Amino acid sequence: RAQAAFEIGRILLHLDQAERAYPFFVEAAHGRNLEILAVLPYYRGRCLVDTGRPRPGIEELLAFVNSLPADTALEIQAYLALAKGYLAEGDHAAALRVLARANTLAEGTPFVEAVRVLRLQLAAQTAAGATDATTPPASDAGPLAPPPPAKDGVGDGGR
C-alpha cells in the first residue's frame, strides 16, 4: 500500500500537481516506509514534520532548500514546513527567520495566505509564552526568581 501511494504521488508530481501529490506521500510515510521517500527530500521532510517528528524533518528540509535554485514554489513550501517544524519545537526565533524568507518569496504568489496564517500562529504562541512567563505561579512556593539578564542589549533599555 505504501509503495502504491508513493507511485501515485510521483505520477502527480510529474504532472506538476505537487499539492495533490502530498497526501499520497503522507500515506507512504504512515506506512512506516520512509526509505521510499528518501528520493524526495522535501516530501520526506514535510511528512516528518506533519507526522510529529519535527527535528528530523527540519534537518531534511534545510538540506533540501540549500540544494535548490532560488525562488521556486517548492522552496516557499519548504520554508512553510520548516516554520511548522520550528513552531512544533517551540523555537520561535527560528520560525520567525524562515517565515521572513517565505514571506519575501511568497509576495505575489498563492502562498501569501499560508505565510500569514503561520505568522499569526507564531504571534499567538509567542504571546502565550510571554503570558506564561509573566504569570505568577498559583502556589505559595516562595518568592519568584529575578528575570534572567537580557541578551544582546534586547530588553535592557538599550544599555
Image (spheres, rainbow, N blue to C red):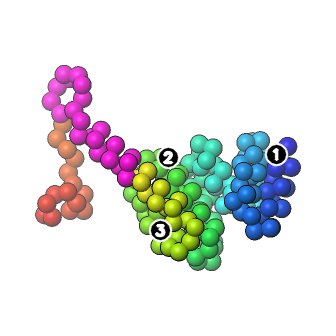
- Residue 123 on image: x %, y %: 37, 52
Residue on which disc 2 sits: 88
Q: Which residue occupies the extreme top position in the image?
A: 140
- Residue 77 on image: x %, y %: 59, 63
Q: Is residue 101 above or below residue 8?
A: below
Instruction: Tell me which label, 1 or 3, sits earlier in the chain.
Output: 1
Residue on which disc 3 sits: 103
Q: In the rendered view, does 20 fall on the left or right side of 136? A: right
- Residue 91 on image: x %, y %: 43, 51
Say how many tags the image has. 3
Residue on which disc 1 sits: 2
Contact flag, marks 2 and 1 (Cβ < 8 Å): no
Q: Look at the image and give the residue range highlighted in magenta.
A: 123-144
The amino acid on which the numbered mark 2 sits, given as a three-letter code, is Ala
Q: Secondary structure at mark 3?
A: helix
Instruction: Tell me which label, 2 or 1, sits earlier in the chain.
Output: 1
Q: CA distance from mark 3 to mark 2?
A: 19 Å
Label ID, residue 148: none
Please tell me in which quadrant of the rendered image residue 37 appears: bottom right
- Please name which of the two marks, 3 or 2, marks the residue nearer to the observer: 3
Q: In which quadrant of the rendered image does the N terminus lie?
A: top right
Q: Secondary structure at mark 1?
A: helix
Q: CA distance from mark 1 to mark 3?
A: 34 Å
- Please name which of the two marks, 1 or 3, marks the residue nearer to the observer: 3
Q: Residue at x 38, y 48 (%)?
A: 124
Q: Residues within 10 Å of mark 2 (few under 14, many from 20)?
A: some
